[in-house]
Amino acid sequence: MSSRTTETLEPGGHAHEHVSDPKAVKDQIEHDIYASVGKPRPLFWIALALSLGAVGIGAVCWAYQIYTGLGVAGITNPVGWGVYIVDFVFWVGIAHSGTLISAILFLFRAKFRSKFNRAAEAMTVFAVLTAGLFPLVHLGRVWFFYWLFPYPNQRLLWINFRSPLIWDVFAVSTYLTVSVVFWYIGLVPDIALARRLKQVKEGKIARVLYGIFSGGWSGSFREWQHYGQLYKYMAALAAPLVLSVHSVVSWDFAMGVVYGWHTTIFAPYFVAGAIFSGCAMVLTLVIPMRKIYRLEKYISIDDLEKLAKLLMFTGLIVGYAYIIELALAVYSGNVYEYEQFMYRMGGDYAWAYWTMMICNIGTPLLLFFRKLRRSIGFLFAISIPVNIGMWFERFNIIIISLAKDFDPYAFGLYTPSLIELGITLGSFGWFFTYYLGFTKTLPVLSVTELKEEVEHGH
Amino acid sequence: MQISRTILIGAFAGCALLIAILEWTFAESGSLMYSMLFFVALSQGPLAIVAAADISRSDWLRAYRRELLSVRHMILFVALLFAIFAASGKVGLYDWAKHPNAWLNPQFFIIRNIALLLLAWLVANRFARESLNDGPHKTMWAIFWVITFVASQTIVAFDWVMSLDYPWISTLFGAYFFVEAFYAGLALAAIMTYFNHHNFVEEFSEKTFQKSQMDMMTMFFGFSIFWGYQFFSQYIVIWYGNIPEEVAYIQYRLNEYSALLYLVILMLFLVPFVLMLSRKIKANPRLVMPLGFWVWGGILLERYFMIGPHLNLHPLIAPVELILGAVVFLVTLLYTRRAALAG
């Protein structure tokens, strides 16, 4: 990197305006970001092997479950929704920060989004793909999965449109479609750029694919004008989805007359929780990526701090919801509601409840300290307990409420089986495999937006 | 128009005295709660907008800072109204007052509410000072204000309104109230866009102000959607669950006040949403001003929808008290404007 550009792109610096030659900076950006799309290093292969190994374990477990029957999972009466549904909600939640960072923060003109949007959007798509597996895993006869969709058939049977589970099918598939389209639109100019990279050699399949997916993008003024408009409209269309998807997921529970599930705050509380977990996952993924691909001068500590603040903010909303739920259970004097919360705090699954409380309420409070908020190691370290805490939040809601319903005769405990845990492990492998593939084939930061920032600096 | 501190104190004292006389004369009337519910949103929401902008270091607020912060003394007036409400024995109108428990008993109810309102006023004042002077602790006080605001609006929702239907509960009620207060604050911004247009343009350039106005009105538009979302989230869960003790709340209101309910949805969601899709409307101060009043009207009707079935709202006293409250609100707005200009 030339000395001229070093001073302009130092970590945390917003000093683009001092650059004498913006073209040099733009070239440098291209060079640095596309550097990751090169020959993989051994560390990459190790990570990929681990992820694929996990996928293998998950696949074997699922195959065994399909062959033997759902009895190999720990779910039984009264806990008919187990770890599979916990995983489903967890992954849908992870998928949330993508749309938030790309659409809402775009509309709010929050500049730091350009450092995370590509990674967050990719994460969104992969997390929805992972989440979408779990309703299938949960099916006894998975080969009939298409019964979930409304399609004309001889017996004139239709799905039950009044079931929140069907709303879920529509909400999640809409979300997947819009996320993919939005991600792809953002990628078009960057893919077009990738065509002329040195490492993508003439005649190679990669070059052909980049050519096809860039859709003949030439970068003319007219194309940029249309592109800008399209991106803005897509952001506006995608923004309500941030609210809708997880609200519908929350209604899978809230519509049911089960104590601990049936409560009005669920929709916004699930949305905030989803963004909370999504931000944590972005930190988990971006911090190592930043280090491995040497992107320190693009993703500064200031940017990470802003994400940490978002994490703290959504964490406080989640904390508010926990307190309100508990307080009103005591206030209302409803014995079932009250017993449910007492059971959560001191019953068979108290360990899961307190894990959630410590991870989701306790750890984000530490971010009030500026010093901790600006420590990259700490941010990475804190993102892990938040992910764990959010998984346990879903575990508590789903399992504990089902384990202790109205009738003492129907009380029962649930322990996840090894098959369920194996498939859960597989889902992490599945997600990380996709993500690793992404970092090696597409630019991990939006080159277009970084260049725009240089342009606006003048 | 210049308002001195004497006029402000005079307005506070005069209006409070008149309201006190009315309250003591009409012992059965719960009208004062109606005014308090309306002005508690108007006095706290605008400050929350400034706090949100200060915390996120956004520049979309620009021109509106002083105008939105100027309502802070209204919180003190609401505290005064609550004191009158308590002193005139109106807490007895709540059913639970006859069977008090640890949380819902008149003494604790009065103490916690007055304490919280006074705390809110103190924090608001401090935050406003920091924010106006761009002080070093601006962000810290903005955070304190947001916490106080959320706590205060939640207690208002649970204590003043939800406890009327005790033991009915809705966990969303607190959040519903603070979002609505924020929405009321944005409506104030819309109104000020028109009435203070001249000053705004004089102080900032026309271009800066137009940009700020567009951002603010986009936010206003966004909150119309967010209000609709919250309303639906609460309604659908109760309606679908259909649990007798829970659904009774909306069933009674749907039977007795259905027209009012549709009107509220029209006023707080449909009309602002459809109109503000247009960029031209958002950019025109003459058009956003009536929308601001329209949304305030919607909030006013909705609060009637909430407490009307329980508290006896006197057809004469309730409007009179609202007007007196509005006078104080206006004086507060003008007073702080004067103080800021002098400073």
Image (cartoon, helix red, strand yellow):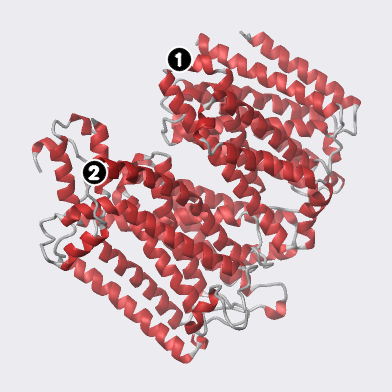
Q: Residue at x 64, y 64 (%)?
A: A260
Q: How many marks?
A: 2
Image position, residue A424 (x, y; %): 42, 74
Image quarter for residue A131? bottom left
Q: Residue at x 16, y 65 (%)?
A: A40
Image quarter for residue B54? top left
Kind of residue sitting beneath label 2: Ser
Q: Which dot, 1 or 2, sits closer to the camera?
A: 2
Q: For mark 2, what is the residue?
A: A220
Image position, residue A262 (x, y; %): 66, 62
Kind of residue sitting beneath label 1: Glu
Give whichever of A313, A271 is nearer the camera: A271
Image position, residue A149 (x, y; %): 53, 73
Taking A192 as reference, is B304 above or below it?
above
Q: Secondary structure at mark 2?
A: loop
Q: Residue at x 37, y 85 (%)?
A: A60
Q: Residue at x 66, y 16 (%)?
A: B331
Taking B342 as reference, is A84 above or below it?
below
Q: Secondary structure at mark 1?
A: helix
